[in-house]
Amino acid sequence: MMLSLRFLWEMDAVSASDGLLEGTRASTMCISAPDSTATASSENMEVLPLRTGQVNGETERPSSANATADEDMTNGEKTPMAGPDSELLPPSVTVSVKDPAPTPTAAPVVPPRSRKKKRRVTELSCEEVRWFYRRSGAEPKWTAFKGYDSMMLEINWRRRNNVDIEAKTLEAIESLPKTNNVVVLDGLYKLEEDFTTISAMYWKEDQLEIRRGTWFVADSLQPIVPDVADAIEAHHLQQFRDQLIPEGPVFSEKEASKKPLLTELKLEENEEVRWNSVIDTYLYSNTKTSRLLRYITWGKGTALKRGYAEISSLEDAKPNFAHLILVVHGIGQKGYENLIAKNTEQMRDVINVMMDKHYPGEKQRPMLLPIEWRSSLVLDKGLTDTVTLSRMARMRNTLNSTTMDIMYYLSPLYRKEIVTSVVRALNRAYGLFIEHNPDFSGQVSVYAHSLGSVICYDILTSWSPLLLYDEYVSTTIENHRKDEKNAESAEVFADFQASRQRLLEVKGGIQNVLLSEDEKLDFRVENLFCVGSPLAVFLIMRGVEAEYLIPKGCPVGRILNIFHPYDPVAYRIEPLFHEAYRNIRPVKLHLSADDRARRDYALAPPECQKSYIKKKKNELKTIEKARKSMLKSKDDISAIKSNDEEMYDEEDECDSDDSSNTMAARSACSSPRSITPPPSDEATAANNTAKKGWWVFGGGSSSQKSTKQQPIEIAKEAEAEERKLTHAEQLIETIPPHLRCKYRIDYQLQPALTDKSYWSVLKSHFAYWTNPDLVMYVLNHLYPRKDDNTLKPSKL
């Protein structure tokens, strides 16, 4: 009988390189004995594990007998174990190995950990130097340039002073566009040759002081005076060149009073710099009082830092513009040459805030440039001031510097000079921008205020008062030719007309004959934003017909008229196409905090004026009432219609956004009046009656009880919305196709709740520069949402 016993044989392989335990190996052994020894108890047998271990870091070698036994077992044969270990087993016992244990493998070699290369004291690189700027006399604190501007200033400074530039920086600037000047701060300022100031390129009398920073006050990171910083840097390199720069503090707080003095540098004006280590540098005052305080360990120096805290990068605030907006001023700039520059800066600040908030992923920003055209004009050579009365001189001078610009522009003597000045300023700003941004391929827009919108419109449409004179002369000559009885005179008139016609054919139109080269722009304008514009009144005085409001071939994509409802200078443009547009409400701009402000306004359906809807309702009620009562008197119906016209005049069309807006549901960001539900028809009629009675008779009845507004059902409100939309569509269908607007032109801002005084009326004309709702609309127009491109604009 065979007795089979199994036991586990563990083998530990220890790596010689690191002494770590690699693993274990197990093998199953069968021990068989003859029948004569089968009765032997288990205590006559002893199981010994065979191990290979490590003693004192060296691998223990097995005996020769064990080695021989291992070799025999690997062949799978039953071989009696010999050697000292065989004495532990009975003589008749044989060992059979069924699963030979594999030879232990060595552990993989672990590569050494890479350590950060320690820095040594060498010359500062372009990335470690930082440039600063401030306004002289107004700002005591220095402001650091962005990484791109600082790098460009440092590179040009080193080229100017023959200082080495590291190879990686030279490689990085190879891909940048080559320009003649160094421009900073979004391309608004250029570097002067002395490397101490930068000057504004697009407006006058604006300079900023700049400073190169290598050593800084550790607490505030304000740069030290360049001469002192250069002396400290030279001494530092002389004493510590190629020494390792510690990563952390060298001395603990307890050792603060026991710092060794390695070297010192005495400066002028009783100052000295002391080094306690490579990174511990302090500036001390060398007066007797300061030395006494240092002796008794009370005096403390100013800690200095070498190199700026942040590394500069060419990708930090690198100029990348998608749109160019040229901002043109209107009246009131005489004597205030830089006022348009300040207004543009205010608008630029609002745009940056809106871009960071609503377009955080947009890397390309719009560029705003001020266009100042008034200061270079002489016009009447001061004759107006000589004829101005001396009484109330301050008010008269204010009027001369503001409203006189309108009279100058209406004069054929000075108009050409004004137009030429505006065109010259626009072309100059565009040329400078393209010179320093040669890779720009975006759109160009004009943001014109007040009279500036009229001037820009005339420039883009090539309109001139000479066109009216030419038309008048041509009509007069033609009438004389027809009425002339003398054949010879009639022939002269006919020859004149024929010569004029041939001249127009050669020149390509009357505009090319009357306009000079200095009245043409060098670029195409995609959008003309007219804000607070009296353009409609100027067009009416010229007798311009609707089909010629935007002539064919005009170098402008769209004309957008934006106004505040209380602006006394602004007028609508859409009713010039057809008088029916008087009853179509201008598009109301949503609040900037409202999510609807980012939607495409072209998708919003047109809406009728509230008074027009009330008028139609009253007409229907009157006709229905007359039909029922068999009343057919036209006088009664006309009287009711005249009352409706009075209601239209009395109605306030300047309310904030209300429920008539069907673009989207209300949000929490809307104005308070947009949250209030509209009153019912009965309540509206009662309010109108009370208002009319107060207006006509001087007051309403005090005994009249106010009725509570009933909540409006959703179905009724939806029906009212549908009725408004239907009225607008029906009204537009009555307009001939050739007189319809191709797109919406009039846009209205929402007034604030406090805009109810005369001061608000005067202030509203100059409130377009900082209005966030207007800025949000401009950005929405320039950066439309991608999900709105698949929708179709509403029919107008």
Image: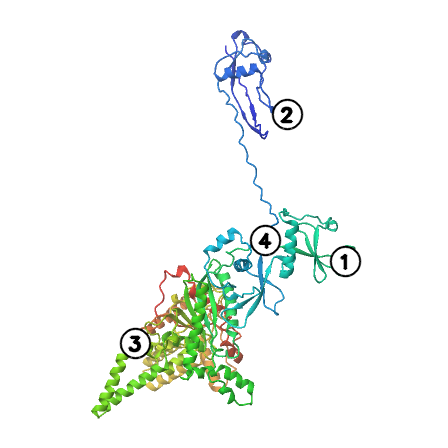
What crowding class fits label 2: few (fewer than 14 Cα within 10 Å), some (14-19), or many (20 or more)?
Answer: few
- Extreme front residue here? 162
Q: Residue placed at 55% from the left, 36% from the top?
A: 111
Check the image and report above or below for 483 versus 278: below
Residue 658 makes an appearance in the image: no
Q: Quadrant of residue 270?
A: bottom right
Lower sequence index among marks 1 and 4: 4
Residue 547 pos. (x, y %): 32, 76
Lower sequence index among marks 3 and 2: 2
Check the image and report above or below for 163 versus 62: below
Residue assigned mark 1? 291
What crowding class fits label 3: few (fewer than 14 Cα within 10 Å), some (14-19), or many (20 or more)?
Answer: few
Lower sequence index among marks 4 and 3: 4
Residue 10 pos. (x, y %): 55, 23
**Cβ atoms under marks 4 and 2 closer than 8 Å:** no
Residue assigned mark 2? 56
